[in-house]
Image (tube, helix red, strand yellow):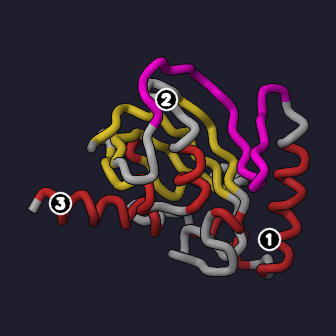
Amino acid sequence: MKHILILTLALGLVAGCGVKEEPAVAEKKSDATPDTKLATGGDFLAENAKKEGVKTTASGLQYKVIKSGTGATPKLTDGVKVHYHGTLTNGTVFDSSVERGEPISFPVSGVIAGWTEALQLMKVGDKWTLFIPAKLAYGEQSPSPKIPANSPLIFEVELLGIEK
């Protein structure tokens, strides 16, 4: 039963569910076409890459270290326990284990590509802000009304532990 709950929570992270969205924000987002969102996301990431402390990987994933940990680094085959707070570039929160008050566990290989890449760079105890391009998130797919297609995503992620 515990594994079903963990899988359900991990899928909730992937689907971006569990957070109520304000109607005014939903109306604002629906005005943009997927192409407009893609261009806006690219603009956001291009400007963000110039900010102090922001690092960009070869894939386009951007991250900023908030706090450095000293623990082990998870592998693709590991599970992890994290706390996270996910927003769109306009600040709209779409999912947050922090707001729910409970960290989540899931396989490193069981989430969007941007998370999978970042987790394998982090050490236990690290807290990073991830700036994930749409192509490493959901791309042209919209996993829920809270996350429009072609949306870059921002996550504050704290790696609490590795679960073998």
Q: Which residues are magenta?
A: 52-73
- The x, y position of residue 45, in whole percent, is 82, 51
Q: Please indicate whether residue 18 sits to the left or right of residue 41 in the image.
A: left
Of labels 1 and 2, earlier in sequence is: 1
In space, the residues marked 2 and 3 are separated at their CA atoms by: 24 Å
Is residue 68 or residue 25 the one in the foreground? 68
Q: Please indicate whether residue 25 sits to the left or right of residue 32 in the image.
A: left
- The x, y position of residue 35, in whole percent, is 84, 79
- The x, y position of residue 84, in whole percent, is 46, 43
Q: What is the number of the mark on residue 67?
A: none
The picture quadrant where one finds residue 33 is bottom right
The picture quadrant where one finds residue 9 is bottom left
Q: Are marks 3 and 1 in contact (CB under 8 Å)?
A: no
Of the residues tagged 1 and 2, which is closer to the observer?
Answer: 2
In space, the residues marked 1 and 2 are separated at their CA atoms by: 33 Å
Q: Are marks 1 and 2 in contact (CB under 8 Å)?
A: no
Q: Are marks 2 and 3 in contact (CB under 8 Å)?
A: no
Q: Is residue 20 visible?
A: no
115 in the magenta segment = no
- Say which amino acid is labelled 1: Lys
- Say which amino acid is labelled 3: His
The residue at which mark 2 appears reads as 123
- The x, y position of residue 139, in whole percent, is 67, 74
Crowd rating for badge 3 (residues with CA inside 10 Å; few <14, some 14–19, many 20+): few
The residue at which mark 3 appears reads as 3
Q: Residue at x 46, y 69 (%)?
A: 15
